[in-house]
Each structure stands twice: as C-alpha cells, then as structure tokens.
Amino acid sequence: MTLTSDIMTPAPRCIGENDALSIAASVMAELDVGALPICGEDRKLKGMLTDRDIVVKAVAIGLDPETTPARSLAEGAPVTVDAGEDIRIALDRMKEHRVRRLPVLEDHRLVGIVSQADIALSLSPQATGETVESISRQAAA
C-alpha cells in the first residue's frame, strides 16, 4: 500500500493569512509554483491560494495586492488528506473536488502537498492519466 506521505512534497512553504497578496505572488515566483497553502500563526491550514485566485478574484476586480491579505481569498474549508491514508483516498479526493494540489495533514498540521506532478513522478501512467483526465473533464463540464 502506498501512503500519501510516500509521494507528497514535504514541508511546503506557507503564506501567512495576514500576508499581502503581493507577498504571496513574490513567493510563488521565487518557488516557481502556482499555489501556496495559507497558514495561520499556529501553522494550521486556513486555505489554499493560487496564482489564478490573485489575478481573477483580486486584481481583476480592483483589490490592491499590496494591502489585501491572503485570508480574504480563502474560501470554505480546504480539502485535505491525512499523511497516513492510502494514496487512493488522496486521488479520489482530488478527482471529486477537482483540485490539482491537495494539502496533507498530520495531527491537524500541514506536513505536505500532493500535486499532479507528484502523482506523475510516483505512480503508474494509468493512475496519473485517470486522475488528470477526471479533474480536467469535470472542470470543463
């Protein structure tokens, strides 16, 4: 059995819930990533922030990225998976919720992220293809 912790990218960098969107964008550019977890001062996950969120939900409607905090774009409870769960549970959640990146928790704290790239590098081409196809097909519907 492959555990989620076996393929996740460990110790993801968070953006603070009170950090400005401009800081988040700079961190994304520095790390060459399209999404960051939003974490509270307690290191607990508050949400996920994507580069698309910054552009579409903030800049496009006139919010100032220098003063708008990351927490303002955290919507609802984030979809997560436990580090000790079978990777099939993570894949099912990604498909069901149409997410390309899934935060991984251990004792209610963020310990990693499973991305489509992690899946492609670690699992069979069939599992990768089915996951990507399902996320993309449902998102287009």
Image (spheres, grey):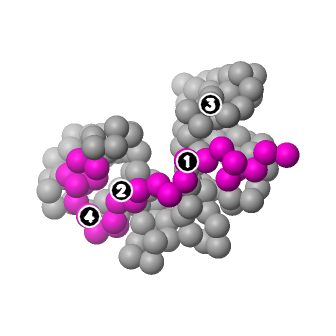
Residue labelled with disc 4: 19
**Furthest-right residue in view?**
1
Please say if the residues under marks 2 and 1 sit with CB atoms less than 8 Å apart: no
Residue at image location 34% in from the left, 65% down from the top: 16
Residue labelled with disc 3: 121
**Which mark lies nearer to you, 4 or 3?**
3
Q: Amino acid at mark 3?
A: Leu
Numbered range of the magenta stretch:
1-27
Magenta span has 19?
yes
Give the number of the disc on residue 9.
1
In this rendering, position of residue 71 left or right of residue 109 = left
Give the number of the disc on residue 127.
none
Q: Nearer the viewer, residue 99 or 112?
A: 112
Sequence-wise, which precedes: disc 2 or disc 3? 2
Q: How far is disc 2 from disc 3 in space, using C-alphas?
A: 30 Å
Q: Where residue 32 appears, x then y in whole percent?
A: 34, 38
Q: Secondary structure at mark 3?
A: helix
Q: Is residue 103 visible?
A: yes
Q: Quadrant of the C terminus?
A: top right
Sequence-wise, which precedes: disc 4 or disc 1? 1
Residue at image location 68% in from the left, 58% down from the top: 83
Q: Amino acid at mark 2?
A: Leu
Residue at image location 28% in from the left, 69% down from the top: 18
Please say if the residues under marks 3 and 1 sit with CB atoms less than 8 Å apart: no
Residue at image location 74% in from the left, 26% down from the top: 124
Give the number of the disc on residue 73.
2
Sequence-wise, which precedes: disc 4 or disc 3? 4
In the displayed structure, 17 sits above or below 136; it is: below
Q: Quadrant of residue 78?
A: bottom right
